[in-house]
């Protein structure tokens, strides 16, 4: 590899690294009131510049974000704007005043005098955000609950703010993809780029996005560069003994419903949203009676959560010393009532999780009642954590009051809770060591890129980067090349930045692939051919904005032509649309789509074998006899559509799977390779596959009396390729062309 190629290519590989470049500063003397782990996190967040703190409730996010804001203001000489849920702002002002941090609560820009300004999300449009050096999103997960227009607006408003901090205990309560909102706000990566780089659409249009198998570790490494996730200080190597929560007891109170819901013949579980609303209305009086009875049976502070306005009015009437907070109240009225409960001036508060379920510190209370349930796990979790948080000294009792007809809601909450617990544990478990290393200033170890090579009779397979391997070949040394490249970011095969499947955009893939195209043009002999297998790629509304097709085949053809190749030919390889429908459940292939709206129906997506020719005269003709290539055979091969390719005739591949591997291992069909090899190469020719995989192209090369050289980046595939190539046998071609084969020196 020449110095020029090395420099350009290695620079490109480095540019693919997903980590966002820190843009922060070293803070001055941190506040003495911070605990050791809090000070470490603030120090890191300042140096990072744009960062996220995902810390469990009660770990002091308020103190950390206030200190971060103070440091940014001191460093820049500018102002910092803190956005918080309603009523949390006043609480923040009070709490930080105890430590000498002056934060002013304002509702519009004209009131904003001072370095640190706090307001509610609802008031952000009343501020000149471009005049602020920094911004903090307190309880940033509420962006998820806003409509997409509002979310996009907040992200856009602060797109040029130099310093940004995102803080929440629930960054992705049920779905890792929700982390994209956080990353996009911070300017680390757009949600669409995150999907392309780390997630895969598990099937068709109706399926779910999931983390790519081989991308998991890479995803967590990326997360650890811009966020810290902690449920206990011990996660970061600090003393966590003081952060042990008391018990949490859930008490179920179920009203047995014998009467059938509207539209039902028999009493049962509500399934639809309408049925659930009807069930709630029918059981309201009973639920209010149970909830009020629980609260009136003692004199301790209590919170009563509800979801319907009628429930709220009935509960406040049934509990003599309760105060009600409703959506119709003014901001001043809400704040006055909530702060009265916070200060212990009111014993009972009746409100909705959507109003006061985020950010409040109510450790003085250890009793709460849900007079009804809904499907939002995040609102349920956040509501419970107003009391059940670090700093609570008593066992927290949570009473769930519902009717038997609402069973589906309760079951849904339980399912989401289990899912959220698993997800939170997964985040902490994966990021614990990475975060600990970053916070404490040590280096995160990266997987080392190691070359290796294996050889046998007539074949050589390199373990390494195909661009690097190809660059070491002599000019005009390869007779033929056939391969199946990664389909952009559709699948991922390794964690390496050198893996072309690890690309966050199509343009990044094409830029990476172009290095290989140029090398192939150099090493293929004049007048000789190269064939690549590909297909067009489905787009999704979530990732691409539309449901349709990306012309992957066309883009590759254009790239080769731009590099000097001649578009020689192509063949369409038929695929069964029924099989594709059963595998992907793609909306466009479902029969119901025809009945509902056939404008969204489409055909199956075929494979293509595209062949390119290098300009120049072929010095050694590729000739065939009438016996070896009769007319009938040529007519089959000359057909623009190959209908008779056996899709299951591939090399064995199951042993190539890693424990966390993608489901996708799809070796190119042997029928396709054999036909291409027979058409466009001579016995004894040297065949190159830059993406050897498990060795399909090499296996056929050897069986047909050719020599083979390949490269493969993934070790498990390389190991299996060695085995497959060692077991290949040179058959009829070796016997028929023994003299030529010997002369080639295979």
Image (spheres, rainbow, N blue to C red):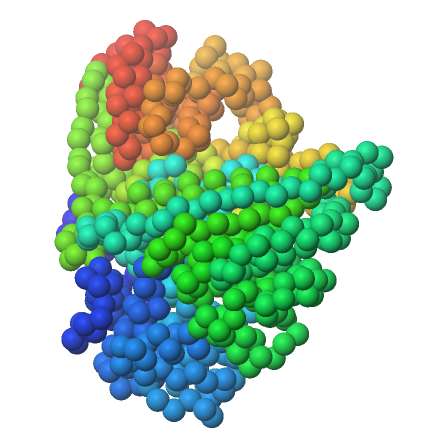
In the image, what residue occupies the spot 22% across and 71% down?
Answer: 33
Q: Position of residue 652 (x, y in %)?
A: 39, 17
Please tell me which residue lies in front, 595 or 365: 365
In the image, what residue occupies the spot 34% across and 8% down?
Answer: 731
Q: Is residue 608 left or right of residue 602?
A: left
Q: Is residue 445 left or right of residue 430?
A: left
> Which quarter of the rendered picture does the N terminus lie within?
top left
Q: Is residue 439 left or right of residue 356?
A: left
Please tell me which residue lies in front, 425 or 573: 425
Please tell me which residue lies in front, 197 or 707: 197
Q: Is residue 2 above or below residue 312?
A: above
Q: How many marks?
A: 0
Q: Position of residue 601 (x, y in %)?
A: 70, 42
Can you see residue 128?
yes
Q: Position of residue 600 (x, y in %)?
A: 70, 46
Q: Is residue 326 left or right of residue 358?
A: right
Can you see residue 543?
no
Please tell me which residue lies in front, 321 or 735: 321
Q: Is residue 587 above or below residue 327?
A: above
Q: Position of residue 659 (x, y in %)?
A: 34, 28
> Which quarter of the rendered picture does the C terminus lie within?
top left
Q: Quadrant of residue 44?
A: bottom left
In the image, what residue occupies the spot 44% across and 73% down?
Answer: 343
Q: Quadrant of residue 595?
A: top right
In the image, what residue occupies the spot 37% across and 8% down?
Answer: 732
């Amino acid at each position: 590899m020449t110095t020029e190629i090395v420099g350009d290519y290695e620079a490109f590989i480095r540019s693919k690294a997903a980590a966002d470049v820190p843009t922060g500063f070293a803070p001055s003397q941190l506040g003495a009131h911070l605990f050791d782990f809090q000070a470490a996190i603030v120090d890191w967040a300042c140096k990072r510049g744009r960062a996220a703190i995902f810390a469990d409730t009660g770990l002091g996010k308020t103190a950390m974000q206030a200190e971060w804001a103070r440091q940014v203001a001191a460093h820049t000489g500018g102002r910092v704007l803190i956005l918080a849920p309603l009523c949390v702002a006043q609480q923040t002002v009070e709490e930080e005043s105890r430590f000498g941090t002056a934060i002013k609560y304002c509702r519009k820009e004209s009131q904003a005098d001072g370095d640190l300004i706090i307001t509610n999300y609802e008031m952000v449009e009343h501020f000149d955000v471009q005049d602020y050096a920094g911004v903090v999103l307190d309880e940033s997960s509420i962006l998820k609950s806003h409509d997409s227009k509002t979310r996009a607006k907040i992200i856009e408003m602060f797109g040029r703010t130099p310093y940004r901090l995102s803080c929440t205990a629930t960054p992705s309560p049920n779905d890792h993809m929700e982390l994209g909102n956080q990353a996009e706000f911070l300017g680390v990566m757009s949600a669409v780029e995150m999907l392309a780089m780390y997630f895969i659409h598990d099937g068709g249009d109706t399926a779910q996005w999931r983390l790519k198998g081989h991308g998991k570790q890479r995803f967590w490494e990326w997360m650890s560069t811009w966020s810290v996730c902690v449920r206990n200080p011990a996660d970061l190597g600090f003393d966590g003994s003081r952060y042990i929560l008391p018990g949490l007891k859930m008490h179920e109170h179920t009203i047995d419903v014998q009467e059938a819901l509207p539209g039902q013949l028999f009493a049962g579980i509500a399934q639809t949203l309408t049925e659930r609303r009807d069930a709630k209305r029918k059981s309201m009086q009973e639920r209010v009676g149970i909830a009020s009875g629980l609260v009136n049976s003692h004199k301790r502070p209590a919170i009563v959560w509800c979801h319907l306005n009628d429930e709220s009015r009935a509960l406040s009437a049934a509990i003599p010393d309760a105060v009600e907070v409703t959506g119709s109240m003014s901001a001043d009225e809400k704040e006055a009532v909530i702060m009265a409960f916070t200060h212990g001036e009111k014993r009972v508060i009746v409100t909705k999780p959507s109003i006061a379920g985020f950010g409040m510190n109510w450790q003085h209370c250890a009793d709460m009642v849900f007079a009804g349930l809904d499907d939002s796990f995040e609102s349920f979790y956040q509501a419970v954590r107003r009391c059940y948080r670090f700093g609570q000294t008593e066992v927290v009792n949570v009473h769930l009051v519902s009717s038997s007809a609402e069973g589906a809601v309760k079951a849904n909450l339980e399912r989401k809770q289990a899912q959220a617990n698993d997800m939170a544990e997964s985040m902490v478990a994966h990021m614990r060591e990475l975060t600990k290393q970053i916070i404490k200033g040590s280096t995160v170890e990266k997987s080392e890129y190691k070359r290796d090579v294996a050889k046998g009779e007539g074949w050589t397979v390199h373990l390494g980067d195909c661009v690097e391997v190809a660059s070491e070949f002599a000019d005009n040394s390869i007779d033929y090349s056939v391969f199946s490249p990664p389909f952009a970011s559709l699948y991922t095969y390794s964690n390496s930045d050198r893996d072309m499947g690890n690309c966050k955009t199509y343009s990044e893939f094409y830029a990476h692939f172009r290095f290989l195209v140029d090398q192939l043009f150099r090493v293929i002999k004049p007048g000789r051919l190269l064939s690549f297998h590909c297909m067009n790629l489905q787009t999704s509304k979530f990732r691409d904005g539309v449901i349709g097709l990306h012309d992957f085949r066309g883009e590759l053809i254009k790239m080769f032509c731009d590099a000097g190749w001649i578009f020689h030919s192509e063949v369409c390889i038929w695929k069964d649309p029924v099989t594709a429908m059963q595998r992907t459940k793609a909306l466009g292939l479902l029969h119901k789509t025809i009945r509902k709206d056939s404008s969204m129906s489409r055909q199956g997506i075929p494979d293509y074998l595209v062949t390119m020719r290098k300009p120049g005269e072929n010095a050694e003709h590729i000739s065939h006899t009438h016996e070896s290539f009769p007319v009938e055979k040529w007519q089959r091969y000359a057909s623009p559509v190959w209908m008779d390719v056996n899709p299951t005739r591939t090399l064995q591949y199951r042993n190539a799977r890693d424990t966390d591997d993608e489901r996708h291992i799809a070796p190119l069909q042997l029928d396709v390779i054999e036909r291409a090899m027979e058409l466009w190469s001579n016995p004894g020719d040297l065949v190159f596959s830059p993406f050897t995989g498990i060795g399909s192209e090499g296996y056929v090369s050897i069986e047909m009396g050719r020599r083979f050289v390949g490269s493969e980046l993934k070790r498990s595939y390389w190991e299996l390729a060695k085995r497959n190539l060692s077991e290949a046998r040179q058959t009829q071609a070796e016997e028929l062309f023994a003299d030529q084969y010997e002369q080639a020196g295979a």
